[in-house]
Amino acid sequence: MPTPIDLAQCAVHTRTNLPWSLRECCEHYASAGIGGVSVWRDTYQTIGINEAAPIIHGSGLRVPALVRGGFFVAASESDRRTAIDDNLRCIDEAAALNAESIVLVVGALPGVPLADARAMVLSGIGAIAERATTAGVRLAIEPLHPMYAADKSCINTCAEARKLCERVGSTSVGVAVDVYHTWWDADLYTEIKRLGDADRLFGFHVCDWRVDTRHMLTDRGLMGDGVIDIPTIRDHIENAGFKGMTEVEVF
């Protein structure tokens, strides 16, 4: 039997509980004994970061992640610059919220060859890494399932993400392992160990994969409602030295 998860070591993504406000998420999570909240930026879009920060700080919840930065792939140089500027703002917001990391969905664009897209991602992360280090915020690259390679992420395996971290060369850049995106990978356990050995294992997201998935983006299942062997993946994550929170991310 797997060891039960301590709710105090869990966080829930605000996107999981739409249409709750940021305040409602924090109040409900804290009252349930959940220890953290992973904040999606749109949750505080209408109130602003200056109002959002006291809500979070007053709740006593940890913020393992601010979601999301990235989207470095663009059709023009000006659009790439805009993306970098937005990521720099995201770092400032993360620092204001005491967020431990920023989840990077790195981007992809139909018509942009994958090799070119990956070069843009390398350049984009390189442009923001020093700012993140100065702010004390980690950048967690989240490899996405290959079904998103055309329009959301050109980084689709933990191995690709790890190699990207190595090329950037900053200790502030690591990987967030989301079981929804990585459960199918035959090299997953090997890559988790490599990430742990390199101190680049920055996040662990859980949900489940339905056999009869009705929508590629929005039909994530609750843990136990699908086919992912979450306990075994969790064992590998913990054996790799991960001490962070288990983040529930269900759409």
Image: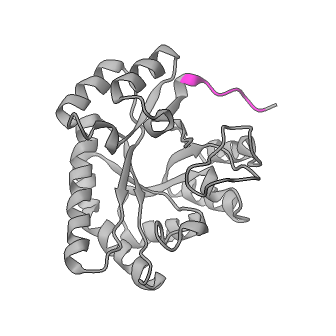
Q: Nearer the viewer, residue 133 or 56?
A: 56
* x and y, in percent, of residue 210 in the image: 72, 49
Magenta stretch contains residue 4: yes
Residue at the (59%, 60%) spot, across then down? 194
Q: Quadrant of the N terminus?
A: top right
Residue at the (25%, 73%) spot, across then down? 80
* x and y, in percent, of residue 29 in the image: 47, 22
Q: Residue 225 appears in which quarter of the rendering? A: top right
Q: Residue 47 appears in which quarter of the rendering? A: top left
Residue at the (68%, 38%) spot, across then down? 223
Label count reads 0
* x and y, in percent, of residue 248 in the image: 55, 37
Q: Is residue 179 above or below residue 46?
A: below
* x and y, in percent, of residue 52 in the image: 25, 31
**Residue that lies at the very extreme toward the front in this rendered image:** 214
Residue at the (47%, 81%) spot, across then down? 114
Q: Is residue 81 above or below residue 191?
A: below
Q: Is residue 133 left or right of residue 248?
A: left
Give the magenta range: 2-7
Magenta stretch contains residue 5: yes
Q: Quadrant of the C terminus?
A: top right
Q: Is residue 38 above or below residue 170?
A: above
Q: Nearer the viewer, residue 204 or 147?
A: 147
Q: Residue 238 appears in which quarter of the rendering? A: top right
**Residue that lies at the very extreme toward the top in this rendered image:** 31
